[in-house]
Image (cartoon, grey):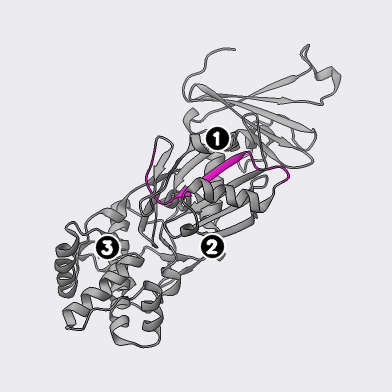
Amino acid sequence: MQTHHCFESILLATVRGLPSSWRSSTNRATRVARCRRPIRHLSCRSAFDLATNESAGGGPRALSAADHRVTNIKVRWGGRYCHAFRSRYSGRRFIGDIFMAAVLVGDVGGTHVRFGVVDVSQNSSRTVEHRADLAADQFSSFQRALLSYLDACGFGVAPTIAAIAVAGPVRGGAVKFTNRNWETSEAELRKLGFERALLINDFVALACAMPVLNESDWIPIGPQLTEAADEPITILGAGTGFGVSCLTRFRGHSLPMATEGGHIGFAPATDEEVEVLRILARRFGHVSIERALSGPGLENLKSVLDELGGYPSEAAAAPDIVARAKAGEARCKAAVDMFCGIFGGVAGDFALAHGARGGVYIAGGIAHNLDLTHSAFRAQFESKGRLSYYVSPIPTRLITNENAAFLGAAQAAIEFG
């Protein structure tokens, strides 16, 4: 086969079950379709669309998967070959030589360990089955939590692919959890029997989920605004810690970007917030966003405001502070109000940093228990001085689909696993 330049890729579609007159001496038939697009941007899914003429843009038609039992697509991409298979009868997909109808997914934070199984044989209407939400404190390690889940499910045939979203930076396929004394790696997952394993940051999983979510999966925070198409998206949220990611998008291509944005410095926007920063700096030294925007962060705000107001110190957990604020208790309400305002200001900062005209999406357990729409969130989001005109058209939305991280992890397994 002749060599093609970098803007021309060769797609080889091999179909079994063809009439004998179409078969070669190796009992196969091969058809070649040329695609004028950069090799680095041709995904396995794009290859399948091209080979079966399922892509919206049409293009050279190879062999129809509707007419034959199995289609095997082989794509030369970046010096290696990728494969995707689809069965006419099951619709199931394979990546490499591995059956890929189901992916075991996880969402592991500082407080909860969640597992499920996602059927990825269909591109739409994916569902999460066998979901389990476990308390992290019940287990001495991530591996024990996973084995407990697998034992409880009692799979006849367990998924061979795992994609786990984790709260912490992933380096070289390994992670040390930021807010829990755990660590794991893709190598450890393979030792547990998975043929393919992927660890990704939990907010990267949310970024990967954005293309498969729709308007029923979020609600607006503030005015109904239309996002700019093909522009970056910011995802951020508060839980045990504070997570930030970005889905960069440009001319039809997208890539998730992991960050440790929750650990950048807290920048106060009001005189009262300056006083809060002063006291937190006395306590912690470096004051990151997470010291104010997280479950422990809300507790910090309540404690500092009590100190500033001359009230006696009291231990109050974040859920109790939120509940008491909803009941009208002034001191707790003041802490929650400050939390919402800081949250909006930080969201606006990241919208500027990422150029997120595609929208800012809020995740995390705390936000679901707050009324961000009727708070200072949106006002602080837009309060960016000379650049207020830039952020004011950007929509802010709360992700309501509780399976978003699972769906994103499964999507990452398809694209990057």
160 drawn magenta? yes
Between disc 3 and disc 2, the foreground one is 3
| Residue 25 locus on image (x, y percent) | 78, 11
Camera-side residue of 152 and 285: 152
Q: Earlier in the sequence, mark 1 or mark 2?
A: 1
Mark number, residue 19? none
| Residue 50 locus on image (x, y percent) | 63, 34
Q: Earlier in the sequence, mark 1 or mark 3?
A: 1
Q: Tell me the amino acid under the disc marked 3.
A: Arg
Left or right side of 300 for 126: right
Q: Which residues are magenta?
A: 156-171
Q: Residues within 10 Å of mark 3 (few under 14, many from 20)?
A: many
Kindly report the distance in space between the C-alpha atoms of the residues bearing marks 1 and 2: 27 Å
Residue in view at x 44 percent, y 60 percent: 111
Q: Is residue 306 above or below residue 205?
A: below
Name the residue tied to disc 1.
Answer: 190
Left or right side of 127 for 108: left
Q: Secondary structure at mark 1?
A: helix
Residue in view at x 32 percent, y 50 percent: 260
Q: Does residue 246 show up?
A: yes
26 drawn magenta? no
Q: Is residue 362 above or below residue 299?
A: above
Mark number, residue 291? 3
Give the quarter of the figure containing the N terminus: top right
Quarter of the view holding residue 18: top right
Q: Secondary structure at mark 2?
A: loop
